[in-house]
Amino acid sequence: MVDNWGFIAVLTLVAFTVPLIGLALSWLLRPHRPGPIKQTTYECGLETIGDSWVQFKVQYYLYALIFVLFDVETVFLYPWAVAFLGLPLFALVEMVIFLGILAIGLIYAWRKGALEWV
Amino acid sequence: MNPDLTPTIWILLEAVVKGAIVIGALLTGFAYSTWFERKVIARMQVRLGPNKAGPAGLLLPAADGLKLFFKENIIPRAVDKGIFFLAPLISMTVAVLAFAVIPVGDPTEVPWREGLLQLGIADFDVALLYLLGVTSFAVYGIALAGWASNNKFALIGGLRAGAQMISYELAMGLSILGVVMIVGSLSLHEIVVWQKAHVWLVLLQPLGFVIYVITAIAETNRAPFDMPEAEQELIAGYHTEYTGMRFALFFQAEYIAMLTVCALAAALFLGGYSLPGVELPWFGDLAVFLGKVIAGMFVFVWIRATMPRLRYDQLMDFGWKVLLPLSIINVVATAVGLALYQNGVFG
């Protein structure tokens, strides 16, 4: 077990180092000729108007909020699923109730228009 | 040398070698996936595709890679430098890490090591949970790249990617649940062994498989769900401002993610590295595994050549109002079916 996590730690290191080496090699090989026009924001070819770090459409965050709720609930389902075959029938009933609550939450968000893209 | 340390050093060496092999294989896989995609799409559009660099254009990926090495990196003044630099590294590292728990063969006896050699970096009992966790990190690379670019189109691309990937992640997590229930384990190796002993899980979880395939395409931001980089609307989406090697890292991450979801589809639903009724040596297992991944990549390319891109609101609607309810129904149906089976209803 410790082996496995150690392996993953080593892989993380290697996986982070390899692209770094690639970047470093490329840094050695490539030309460096920055210019005032070259370093403007490309965007779409036209001159950029203003910053992009501004207030942005709230819809994206709404989805993120609903996601967090459902994701946490999904995590609860995993241990149940692993143990499912060894559990008594009552566990099934309980989980159906739990999923029912989940579904009601989805229906609520749906009815409230949180899933409507405006 | 202290004799007690020797095994540790060997294990460490094994870990480094394994890591190097996995990364080497993934990078080669990435290079030839791009070649494969161009070739297959060309064929589907009645063109020849790459055929100049080397036989059948096989040297083209190498030429592309070399070109990107020599390209100047332009860093616009307006970007957030630290995050701009870090985002492609995050994408790439996470894409490689996700592959760690994919089994490519049965544990094998080797002369230089006590115990069995795990084929694949690691195999532990929460492998699937680890994989889901690591893949959800992929959204950071893309969202941060979009934000750090300080470019409206990149920002929109990054935000779209964030919302899309987390939305489809839900349905993906739930679609895999049926498999976990039937096998009773989160270890990918055990799931494959179970399928070897019984039957491919795609036959028991057809709905789960379909939902998994759709969400896998959405998770990797591929057509028809390639909203984060919709060329006609967003220039190149989150990597508009990236050039040279940094762009290459995003490109690599995307293809490695595709390879990983194909490998995961094989492991979860299509018997992994095994063929029904045949016992193969380790290189046979590996060949079967590769064959399944290539078949999966073919489906990816096929879908890209066939389907037009969805509109963003349709995409979100589809994820939340179709796939999520369906995957909840799939979980309940699997649970009821298993309970009935256990109580002997199916005789």
Image (cartoon, coloured by chain):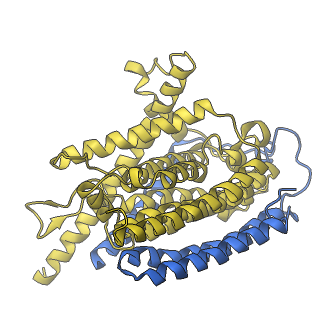
Q: Can residue B240 be seen in this view?
A: no
The residue lying furthest to the left in this view is B111
Give whichever of B137, B185 is nearer the camera: B185
Q: Is residue B303 visible?
A: yes
Residue B130 on image: x %, y %: 45, 70
Q: Quadrant of residue B159?
A: bottom right
Judged left or right of residue B276, residue B27 is right
For residue B101, above or below residue B300: below
Give whichever of A25, A9 is nearer the camera: A9
Give the quarter of the figure containing the C terminus of chain B: bottom left
Residue B76 on image: x %, y %: 74, 51
Q: Colour of chain A?
A: blue
Judged left or right of residue A43, residue B33 is left
Residue A80 on image: x %, y %: 46, 78
The residue lying furthest to the right in this view is A49
Judged left or right of residue B113, residue A81 is right
Rendered residue at 52%/39% (across/down) = B300
Q: Colour of chain B?
A: yellow
